[in-house]
Amino acid sequence: MRNIITFAMTALVAAVLVPRFIDRMPPAVSAPTPTAASLAAPTAPSSSPTAGPRSVTIEPDWHGHFQVDAIVEGRQVPFMIDTGASQVVLTTRDAARLGFHPAPRDYTVQVRTANGVARAAPLRLETVEVGAVMLHDVPALVGAEDVLSDNLLGLSFLSRLHRFEYRDGRMILEE
C-alpha cells in the first residue's frame, strides 16, 4: 500500500509540475539494473573530500530505494530520493515537526495520483542539507493528510544540483 501511495503522489506531482522544471533537468543517465550486491543493506551517505565540489554518494536500501536523512530547517527528516517527483514533498506529520501547519485553505495545488486527485500546500524550505550538499530556498509541497507515507526528495532539490546520477548501483548528488 505504501508503494502505491508513493507512486500515486509521485505521478500526481510529476504531472502537475514537470513542465516547470523540464528545461532545467540535467541530461538523463542510463542506469544499470541493480544486482544482488547493490541491494545490500543501506549505508549512511558518504561525502567527498573537502577539495572540489561537495557531493554525497548514497547506497540503495534492500528494496533498491535511495533513502536519506536530510537536515531541513535544522531538523533531521527522512526522505526517499525520487527523480520522478517534481517537488520536494513532505508528509503532514513531518511538516508539522518542522513548524509548518498549513490551513485547509492553503492546499491550493491539485495533484493527480493513481488513487485520484489530491491537494497539496506549497511552501519554501530555507535549507535542505543531504550530507555535504546544502541548498537554500527550496520549493516544496505538503501533501494532504494520509496522501503520502514518505517524504519525497524531488526535482525542486535535485535539479538545482550541479549533477545527480545513478552509477554503479549508487546515487551521486553533487552541488
Image: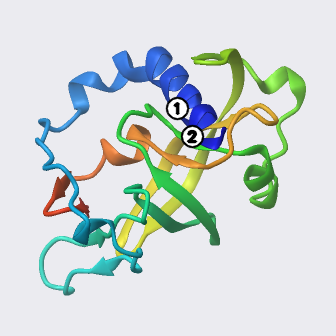
Comparing 126 with 104, the one in front is 104
Q: Secondary structure at mark 2?
A: helix
Q: Estimate the x, y position of residue 84 in percent, counting from the top left.
A: 38, 33
Horizontal and vertical percent position of residue 66:
40, 58
Residue 138: give x, y in percent of width and height: 49, 46
- Quadrant where the C terminus lies? bottom left
Look at the image and tell me whether residue 163 can be seen: no
Which one is in front, 16 or 169? 169
Identify the residue shown where x is 77% and y is 31%.
Answer: 144
Residue position marked by numbered label 1 in the rendering: 7
- Which quarter of the picture shows residue 24? top left
Q: Quadrant of residue 63?
A: bottom left
Q: Evaluate if marks 1 and 2 touch, with contact meaning CB atoms under 8 Å apart.
A: yes
Considering the numbered disc 1 on the image, is that residue within a helix, a strand or a loop?
A: helix
Which residue is painted at 26% across and 65% down in the image? 36
Which residue has dot 2 on it?
3
Is residue 144 in sight in this rendering?
A: yes
Q: Quadrant of the N terminus?
A: top right
Q: Is residue 18 left or right of residue 31?
A: right
Q: Residue 126's image quarter?
A: bottom right
